[in-house]
Amino acid sequence: MMSKVAVIAIGGNSLIKSKEQIGLYDQLATVKETCKHIAEMVAKGWNVAVTHGNGPQVGFLIRRAELAVEELPMIPLEFAGADTQGCIGYMIQQSLMNEFRARGINKKAVTVVTQVVVDQNDPAFQNPSKPIGSFMSEAEAKRHAKEDGWVVIEDSGRGWRRVVASPEPQRIVEIEAIKELLGEGYVVICVGGGGIPVVDKGDKLEGVAAVIDKDYASSLLASEIKADSLIISTAVDKVAINFGKPDQKDLDRMTVAEAEAYLAQGQFPDGSMGPKIKAIIRYLKDGGSRGIITSPAAVVAALEGKTGTHVVP
């Protein structure tokens, strides 16, 4: 019998403390801090699947490729996703295993490079909206559009950028392996960056240039493994309504109906808290029991009901 299971989603931006601290050793130091809190969850009896964002890391990788384009070929987006899953997974699994060793916990962590099936007819492919990579001049952008088939847009007067589709996650290809590893007691790092987007062509899987929202993919994972809690970690301890205004109010608890009402009022914009709230609503409507949004340092206290915003059916 598996003990209680939690999915914890870590943001890719949260691995970077400042614009000056973007190196891999800087990111590793930040991961070590987060992993102390995850190890504490494990010490308290939780089986854990860890998911993570990878937006900034994919951006860095593509920028390196752009700078080296005279000598080396560009990195296709789905390969950049796979690269960052491996790299961030390595940082998390090593940090967790060192933490377990220091605490005398007999546990291991493993990374599963994860593919997530998307529908090739998803409307998102007709309307690419997710900016990736660095800013370019108009001439450079149009050259990429012509030579590489990129969709490019002018981004708020800051320059030109490539945009890609953000389709809905349909199915996690490696789900059975993830379930087996969790059942064996491993902490599983998976669905990194929302998973590598692939389309199922019947006789084969094929990678596509797209970005899956990592919170939506984490929600799908939580439903598939029947997790007891879905925790989405972010920069704040609690979600607030009227954010940044004099009447800002932190929320301890809300039902799905209340969360949907706040979404309809525009309290949780798409660029910030919206996807996190929507992801938790999906998980709860699919039979989940509790969603929590809180900061990495508050995760254990939130699981004990002492902080965080708790969303319930």
Image (cartoon, grey):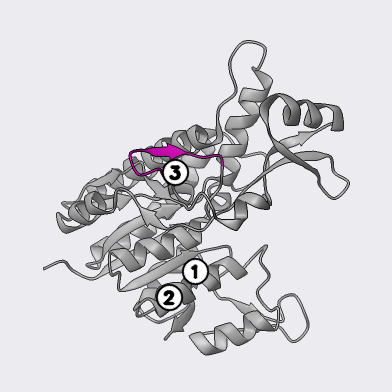
* Residue type of the residue flagged with mark 1: Ala
Query: Which residue lies under the disc numbered 3?
Result: 198
Secondary structure mostly seen in magenta is loop
Query: Which residue lies under the disc numbered 2?
Result: 291
Left or right: residue 86 versus residue 54 is left
Q: Residue furthest left?
A: 1
> Quick check: marks 2 and 1 in contact, CB under 8 Å?
yes
Question: Which numbered marker is on residue 279?
Answer: 1
Residue visible at 61% across and 34% down in the picture: 60
Across and down, in percent, residue 66 comes to: 67, 24
- The magenta stretch is 200-209
Residue visible at 46% across and 40% down in the picture: 28
Magenta highlight on residue 230: no
Residue visible at 58% across and 50% down in the picture: 13
Q: CA distance from mark 2 to mark 1?
A: 9 Å
Across and down, in percent, residue 22 comes to: 60, 38
